[in-house]
Image (cartoon, rainbow, N blue to C red):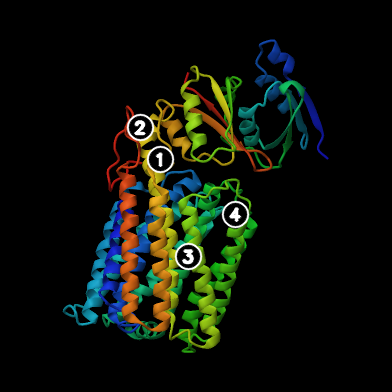
Amino acid sequence: MSYFAAALAWLFVALALMVAGLGYPVAHLASPDTLVVVHVVCIGWLSIAMCGALFQFVPVLVAKPLFAEQWALPALGLLTAGLVALLAGFLGLGGRLPAWLWLLPLGAVLLVAGFGLVVVDLGLTAWLRPAGPVRFVLAGLASLCATVAFGAIFALAHAGWGGSIGEKLLASGVPLHAIAGLGGWLTLTAMGVSYRLLSMFMLSPDVDDRKSNMTLVAGALAIAVAVAGGVFAIWLTAGLNVVLPVTGAFGLAAIALYGRDVIEIFGTRQRRQLELNTRMAVLSFASLAGAALLGLALILTGDFVDHLGAFAFLAIFGWLSGLVLAQLYKIVAFLTWLETYGPVMGRVPTPRVQDLVSETRASKWFVIYHVAVWFGTVTLLAGHPSAFRAAAAMMVVGLVGIAREVIRIRRLADVARPLRFPDGACAPHLLCARN
Amino acid sequence: MTEYIDVDVRPILRAGGEPFSVIMAALARLEAGQGLRLYVPFKPVPLFAVMADRGFAHSEQALDAGEWEVLFTPTGAKPTASAPGKAAFDAWPEPSVRLDNRDLDPPEPMVRILGAAEKLAPGATLSALLRREPVFLFPQLEKRGYRWLGGFSPDGATYELTVRAPS
């Protein structure tokens, strides 16, 4: 729960910055201000939420406890401290703070330590039973290592400690860092987790491992080509003109295969009535498909570089953030239910998980959020920074609503009074879960 | 083609006897590659895990009057070193409650199993059919001192769980 709370707090920070007009599209895509917003979103919000979800999810998948339960909190501390140092370093680069460039390598070291704990802990846990969705998680963790390694080299290079290799990588390796992070770490992991969550909540049979393997292989090849091929190309000073189209082709194949698998899960489901997290996940799948089509269209028209920001915005906020928010809503409800009523279940009447949530009230906030994201993408494509800020403000409205719903779940505010605290049940703490 | 040795433990059970030693004795007499065809008056779920540890896959077929014919086929896998001994499972009685939770929405199966488990007499068992491995249920059973055995049916569509109350 601390991970989810920290992640949501960072998402608010990012949206506040966007509403205030900091970073892209007001500033250039590679400007320090844009780097601040991008890293708040990708590390603060998405990576921390993903780590929190994986700490819950991987032990369930392998039916074994985490390798080291007690590492979770120090890892969160290191990640938070590292991110703050990194952001301060970026602000220094942009002249908004004194130029203490040593903050960047310091941030990198803290982030390497934090993500290192996460990778070792989850990796050793996942390795016990490397089947099904866990393979996606392992591929995601490998991509995370690549992402962090790139980031650390960039941080050293910014501080002037990177040597000629660091300079060379910083000059042309940024797309590789972004592909490994967004595509490998966040997207592959989110895909893996969604396979199991979707079939669990819709009572569908699991997707055949051979099919999900194809999706994984296509995705992993995209990342491997980008990382290994990209580094090789930079070493040869050949540019990324060959590597990026190959990566894109594998990436599109992975998204298409994933789409096929998701449609199969929906098609074979036993449960006709879909829960909110699944219905809202559909909106994020639409964004993923939209991002793939937009990327393809931009490449074909030769406008990809000009509209990279719009593409990344749709992928980050529509697909990844949308999926994480939808599943977060369900995960918090389920964990809260288990934490509060698990010990007394079967002994006294307990509420159902559905009694902890109010889906009709919550779904309107999700819809506002997604519409705002699509509106924001259009404003970016059309080049209207002020309209974009309005879209970001609308996203904040949706998000405040979602956060309020999540807090109500933690407080059991929607459970009918007589059932709320049966004998032996005790109220969950807002930020710390007991299980 | 696997050759099967027949073992019918229905008379032993009807007489109130204990069939485990008979089954294990028959197992010891099997030649390499031979399987076991077992006739039982109930589905012997706890036995499946024991046999799997010894390198046998099971497939079962319902006969009339709730009786079962179970084929144990050697898989060629080496028996695991820590195969649970006779003491661990031979005393599990026939389930006194049977639940079919396959068509319930999660987490309703878990609620029903815990509810039924609370009502079991000491040492009694219940069996439940599920669609997936009930991973969230296991810690709750553990906290309450229950033991359980479970596994997927050969087609992978049904998870069979047997829970035993602490005696």
Q: Which mark is residue A355?
A: 1
Task: Identify residue type, mark 4.
Answer: Ile
| Residue B141, position as x, y percentages in the image | 45, 31
Task: Identify residue type, mark 3.
Answer: Thr
Q: Along the polypeptide, which appears first: circle 4 or circle 2?
A: 4
Q: Along the polypeptide, which appears first: circle 1 or circle 2?
A: 1
Q: Which mark is residue A406?
A: none
Q: Are marks 1 and 2 on the same chain?
A: yes
Q: Is residue A420 above or below residue A250?
A: above
Measure how far apart labels 3 and 2 are at the Cα level.
39 Å
Task: Identify residue type, mark 1.
Answer: Asp
Q: Are marks 1 and 4 on the same chain?
A: yes
Measure how far apart labels 1 and 4 are at the Cα level.
26 Å
Q: Are marks 3 and 4 on the same chain?
A: yes
Q: Residue furthest top?
A: B15
Q: Nearer the viewer, residue A319 or A36?
A: A319
Q: Which mark is residue A265?
A: 4
Closer to the observer: label 4 or label 2? Answer: 2
Measure how far apart labels 1 and 2 are at the Cα level.
10 Å
Q: Which mark is residue A187?
A: 3
Q: Is residue B32 above or below residue A302?
A: above
Q: Residue furthest left?
A: A98
